[in-house]
Image: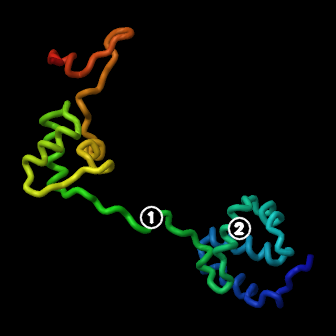
Amino acid sequence: MQKIQWSDLPEARQLASLGKKVSRPAQGRLQWMLFYYFNGRNAARTCRRFGISRQTFYRWKRRFDRHDLTTLEGRSHRPRQLRKPTWSAELVERVLALRKQYPRWGKDKLVVLLRKKTVHRFYFDGRAHPGATQTARGVARATETRRVAAGTTETAESSMGYSQA
């Protein structure tokens, strides 16, 4: 294998001098690339030398542009596009009020109540249902079971003296 000379990579000297303008992690990645290019383009040796995985090295090698050092900077992990809320604030408040008024009722009964009280029509799909509002806002359901004695359970309603008929 032939070693790369400074003349083979004319901007290598310039890249090394510009290393102070990038963040510390990007400077480290620049060292990986310079070591790789000046030591026979041996990825396995570069990874052993710097203690990184080949997958990580090849990811940064694919991003690396020797004319633009900002390609060695880390990218944001935030999604590029965020989902917009499908419910209006008014509808959320109404669902929460109904949940507090009827804590034992499920989403199917709440949909019927909401449709009776609203003029406009709306549909709940698998993601947007009255139960989703409850979990998003942290409203607890009254149907939680708890252990009373060994081997028996009772619901919150029966412990408060309500009949289940």
Label 1 packing within 10 angstroms: few (<14), some (14-19), many (20+): few
- Residue at 65% x, 86% y is 67
The image position of residue 66, as x and y in percent, is: 68, 83
Real-space Cα separation, disc 2 to disc 1, in angstroms: 23 Å
Label 2: how many residues lie within 10 Å, few (<14), some (14-19) or many (20+)?
few
Question: Judging from the image, what secondary structure is the residue with disc 1 in?
Answer: loop
Residue 79 badge? 1
Is residue 60 left or right of 161 when viewed as pictured?
right
Q: Which residue is mark 2?
A: 58
Q: Mark 1 belongs to which amino acid?
A: Pro
Location of residue 164 in the rendering, given as x and y in whole percent from the top left corner: 18, 18
Above or below residue 156? Residue 51 is below
Circle 2 sits in a helix, a strand or a loop, which is it? helix
> What type is the residue that disc 2 sits on?
Tyr
Front in this rendered view, residue 51 or 110 = 110
26 above or below 91?
below
- Of the numbered discs 2 and 1, the one sitting upstream in the chain is 2
For this rendering, which residue is in front, 125 or 105? 125
* Vertical side of 28 occupied by 165: above or below: above
In the image, 105: left or right of 55?
left
Q: Quadrant of the N terminus?
A: bottom right
